[in-house]
Amino acid sequence: MQRTLFILLTITLLFTACSTEDDSFVMHNIKGYTIEDGQLIGFDAIVVQNGLVLDRGSSDDMQYQYADFTSIDGEGRTLIPGLIDAHAHVMGLGYQQLDVNVQGIRSLDETLEKIAEYAEENPDMEWIQGRGWNQVLWEENEFPTAEDLDRVVSDRPVYLTRVDGHAAWVNTKAMELAGIDRDTPDIQGGVIRRDEDGNATGILVDATMSYVRDIIPGRTPEESELALELALEEMARHGITSVHDARTDVSTWEMYKRFADNGDMITRIYAMIAGAGETFDEMAAEGPVNSYSDDLLALRSVKISSDGALGSRGAAMIEEYSDDPGNYGLLFFDQDELNGMLLKGASAGFQMNIHAIGDAANLQVLDGFEYVQNELGDQSGLRHRIEHAQIVQPDDIPRFVELNLIASMQPTHATSDMNMAEDRVGPDRMEGAYAWQTFLDQGTVIAGGSDFPVENVNPFYGLYSAVTRKDHDGMPPGGWYSEHTMSRIEALTAFTIDAAYAAHQEDVIGTLEVGKWADFILIDRDIFEVDASEIWQTEVLETWVGGRKVFEKE
């Protein structure tokens, strides 16, 4: 409770410190950049009125023309459009800060130590929850077991999701409560990992995660609100002015609206309805919500997952995994089921955003969108998307153009996965893997994102990965499959105007053009002039949303 009160006080002080400026102001003495028609445009001053960009140009001209406006000295700092994360999990980011976070830990023993410390610090918690473990980073490079967890927490159930969110590691107590034993069956789209004797090991992949997840008590309203506040603060601190929330449920959408109504929503959220089932039926009853509260919120898309993830070998592959013979991954639906969900959402006027990582999943989703186009006609107006599009058969990539699809891709996935991706799929299938330039060359829009908290929330990590295809130590020296690196303009485009386009919002955000919302950030270096190795180190000094300063670095 003390920790919760401290966090709430910190957030309150932060939001109070970021009070709004006058409605009309000129910010001058800046090194401003924006993208227009694929070109980088520079300016020295920006004029804002009623939250919108009124003008921009030279400092002398703008200060003279708008002499009655409040004058703000930008102190020579670099200003760029607010960054848009086109695929993320807002509440996951907030809960990550409330739960045990083991992301990035490089050994099983250190991971267990962190879990033990968290359990000891929270003796009254009924369940220990968290996320972020990644066996690929460990020297053992083996999936952990329930017995491992039992060594540090045996008196309470433990549920920890893998870094990609597509597998859960649970202890014996959790399996007992869920009734999981050697006779518990796998289900469509999921696998219980078992030992040589057929006993459940404590690793649940994809759909089988529900065996335990469904018995965990729900979050309290107070926990959810705190998690949202924490997530909003984190996004503002890192220069994210808009985010596409991949899977939003009924209660979360209602909470988003309350925050917007109360003036507490400091990041724009483009929400994707969680699936095409009962949640969709309730949330879509009155049709798409194109804009709510001055474009702070929108609800006009649906998120469905077609397969698992590469790290847990759940991504659906046409041929078996190169490092796991006989394993083809997991398709969550058969073709008719997926076709029906796509048709249901599209018929109601919703953009369909489908998670597909493996080449079999991408093929299935492409076939599904072709089915919808044959049934309903041209779908270009809805701007359907494939989320991730990580491993695609080269012959299938042109179908993105034929079907007017957006590729919603996360550059940091490439640099995070390069330690295992080729092991998983072999060198031949890498031709269509993380193939950004192949998509760009054929005219496909790439919407840039992170998939946080799977990856770090910092969008400059994504810009750096896009431009270099290296890790933060500069490895590999030439870049991983460097033929797919983006230019700096292409990378910024993916995280601004093309991400806005992917949300039907290119007329209101994404660039600093006259008449659009004044969403911009001030940063500590010129990302177009510094060595590319520095891009990931960029720090955000101020974040502005709709002409309102929502973050200032102390």
Image (cartoon, rainbow, N blue to C red):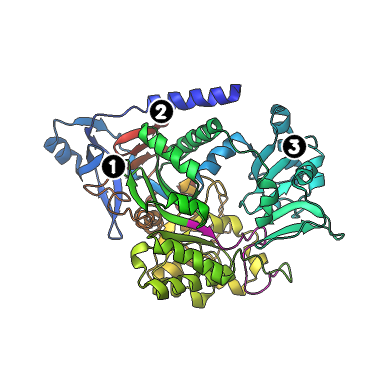
Which stretch is magenta? Answer: 303-322
Q: Quadrant of residue 328?
A: bottom right
Q: Is residue 489 magenta?
A: no
**Alpha carbon of mark 2 to alpha carbon of mark 1: how far?**
19 Å
Position of 335 with respect to 84 (left or right) is right
Q: Disc 2 marks which amino acid?
A: Phe
- The residue that label 1 is drawn on is 518
Q: Secondary structure at mark 3?
A: helix
Q: Disc 1 marks which amino acid?
A: Ala
Q: Are marks 3 and 2 in contact (CB under 8 Å)?
A: no
- The residue that label 2 is drawn on is 15
Indicate which label's residue lies in the foreground, 3 or 2. Answer: 2
Image coordinates of residue 327 in percent, x first then y, are 71, 68
Label 2 neighbour load within 10 Å: few <14, some 14-19, many 20+: some
Q: Are marks 2 and 1 in contact (CB under 8 Å)?
A: no
Q: Which mark is residue 113?
A: 3
- Name the residue at the left extreme: 65
